Image (spheres, grey):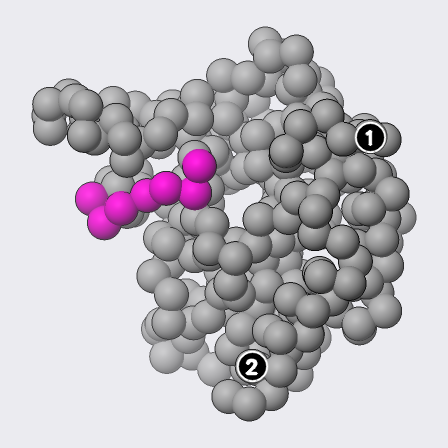
Amino acid sequence: MVPAAFAATAAPRVPILVYHRFASRMLDSMTVRIANFEDHLHVLHQLGCQVISLAAWVAWRLGRERGERVSLPPRAVVLTADDGHRSQFEVMAPLLRERGWPVTLFVYPSAISNASYAMTWAQLQELASDPLLSVQSHTYWHPNLVRDRQRMPPTAFQRFAASQLARSRDTLELRLGRPVTLLAWPFGLGDEGLARQAQQAGYEAAFSLGNRSAVAGDSPFDVPRHMIVDSVDARQLAARLEAAFADKAAS
């Protein structure tokens, strides 16, 4: 259930932000400079945002679908990060822990303790032990499933996609001892067929990219997230958030 303390408003629009990696200087297009990330966190505080867990948003979304009277706090925002980069352990998690803010990490297990940029299993296990932090699935090795569907025979593709969905979930649950019920599509790309497979595999919701805020009417297997890169400065982030909150007030 959504916590009772979240019973302030129906909150029809919720910005879900997704980050990837952090560094003191720009390394590539997916890197957010640490100073810029700290400015983003300051914006969330200054605007009075209520940072809620992704699980709370999903509970709200599915509860509304069942006709339950559930609600979220005003100015609710969700933080997520993809790909299991080591800087999420070294930079992001400590800064969020200082503020008591939750975050969901979407991880593809093949990279963990293998790729040079990725966390180790020990680091991921340490994060997963924190009640403010959730580790969820990003498939097993981050394929472009929509493109692969076009390249592969239908039966072979269905087996491949099913393996990516199940192997990721099973590996994370075995390694971390926590349930895995949420999925982020690699490259933000899914489709209706993949959504059905994800649901059959036991996932409750899946997240894409869309640079708009999530609403109750979104398919639970195509929930948009705002991609946050370094070119999004504090002023631009504030504008995105205020636009979402204005839509809430008007609805």
Position of 32 with respect to 158 (left or right) is right
Local crowd at mark 2 within 10 Å, few (<14), some, or many (≥20)? Answer: some
Q: Residue 119 location in percent, x, y?
A: 68, 20
Determine which of the numbered discs, if any, sits on residue 96 in the image.
none
Amino acid at pointer 1: Arg
Residue where numbered disc 2 is placed = 247
What's the distance in space between the residues labelled 1 and 2, CA to CA?
Answer: 35 Å
The residue at 54%/73% (across/down) is: 13
Q: Based on the displayed image, in which of its 4 quarters is residue 128 positioned?
A: top right
Viewer-closest of 70 and 228: 228
Which SS class for mark 2? helix
Viewer-closest of 12 and 58: 12
Residue where numbered disc 1 is placed = 25
Q: Is residue 250 visible?
A: yes
Q: Which residues are magenta?
A: 187-193
| 27 over 248 or under it: above or below | above
Which SS class for mark 1? loop
The residue at 47%/82% (across/down) is: 69
The residue at 74%/66% (across/down) is: 238
Local crowd at mark 1 within 10 Å, few (<14), some, or many (≥20)? Answer: few
| 167 over 228 or under it: above or below | above
Q: Is residue 72 visible?
A: no
Mark with earlier residue (1, 2): 1
Q: Residue 41 location in percent, x, y?
A: 81, 55
Position of 192 with respect to 203 (left or right) is left
